[in-house]
Amino acid sequence: MLELNGVHTYYGNIQALKGISLEIRSGEIITLIGANGAGKSTTLMSICGVVPPQAGEIRFRGEPIHGLIPNRIVSLGICQVPEGRHIFPQLTVQENLDLGAFLRTDKAEIRRDLDYVFSLFPILEERRHQPGGTLSGGEQQMLAMSRALMARPQLLLLDEPSMGLAPLIIRQIFEIIRKINQEQDTTIFLVEQNANQALRIAHRGYVIENGRITLTDTADRLLSNPEVQKAYLGM
Ligand code: ATP
């Protein structure tokens, strides 16, 4: 579904990605794990066109997408939930969700997707007329994920969905990520510092260090890899 080949991305003179190659197959949950500043968020932003790569190629369903503007990439079926959620705090929950569907015209299907996100996160239906900014951190993460789902993506990019949340909410969020993957047939690329939880729901994973992929394997094998355990699982 998605292929990165030798992707190099810079912020001015700072080279954040130094030739990233990876692939995500349809139906998979793939996780990218790594330390602070390793290049995880930059990988996602390169895919969705916010920080375009200077070299290398990114293909979605075989077609090159590097160089396309972010709106066009969303319309192809790739949607990102950015780190820190970035919901619109002054707008109500319902208005935030409406914005997720702004490129769509299929009203009946939009209604169906709204019912689906409310079934995943009933608290959002209860709070649909409240401003997004009045929600708790966990609820804002739910809203950000729901807003992305309202675009009905084929590929959902999640940047640190567990950041700053309590353990109980984190478990709930990861369970729902698994559910979205299974029920909606949505392929998921999950960037996480919480490697333990991410590898428990992923099919495969990549390890990124200092802008380079240093290891890739099935999630099970990464979980039992002594180097991964030492560096990322606190064992
Ligand atoms: P974190 O978990 O802290 O978000 P990350 O793995 O997502 O880390 P990135 O945010 O992709 O890492 O950062 C990769 C490198 O690019 C780091 O060296 C970082 O300092 C640098 N970087 C990121 N954003 C910018 C920016 N806007 N301007 C300059 N350098 C940046």
Image (spheres, helix red, strand yellow):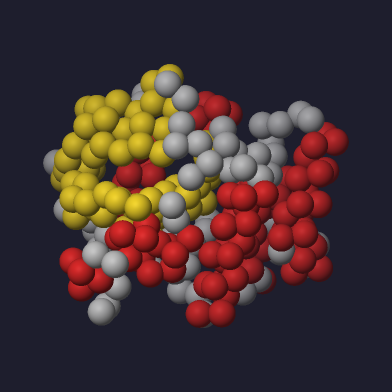
Estimate the x, y position of residue 114 in percent, counting from the top left: 77, 49
Give above or below for 222 relative to 214: below
Q: Which corner quadrant of the image does residue 193 belong to?
A: bottom left
Tell me which residue sits at (76%, 52%) in the image. 116
Vertical arrangement, residue 47 with respect to residue 87, above or below: above
Tell me: 107 left or right of 158. Answer: right
**Image position of 24 with respect to 88: above or below:** above
Quarter of the picture holding the C terminus: bottom left
* Viewer-nearest residue: 70 or 176: 176
Residue located 79% across and 30% down the image: 106
Residue farthest top in this picture: 63
- Residue 144 can be seen in this image: no
Q: Is residue 118 left or right of residue 16?
A: right
- Image position, residue 191 (x, y; %): 39, 55
Q: Looking at the picture, how far across and down is residue 88, in whole percent?
A: 61, 55
Q: How many marks?
A: 0
Q: Residue furthest right?
A: 108
**In the rendered image of this protein, does residue 20 appear above or below residue 136?**
above
Q: Residue at x 35, y 52 (%)?
A: 218
Position of 233 with respect to 115 (left or right) is left
Visible in this render: residue 167?
A: yes
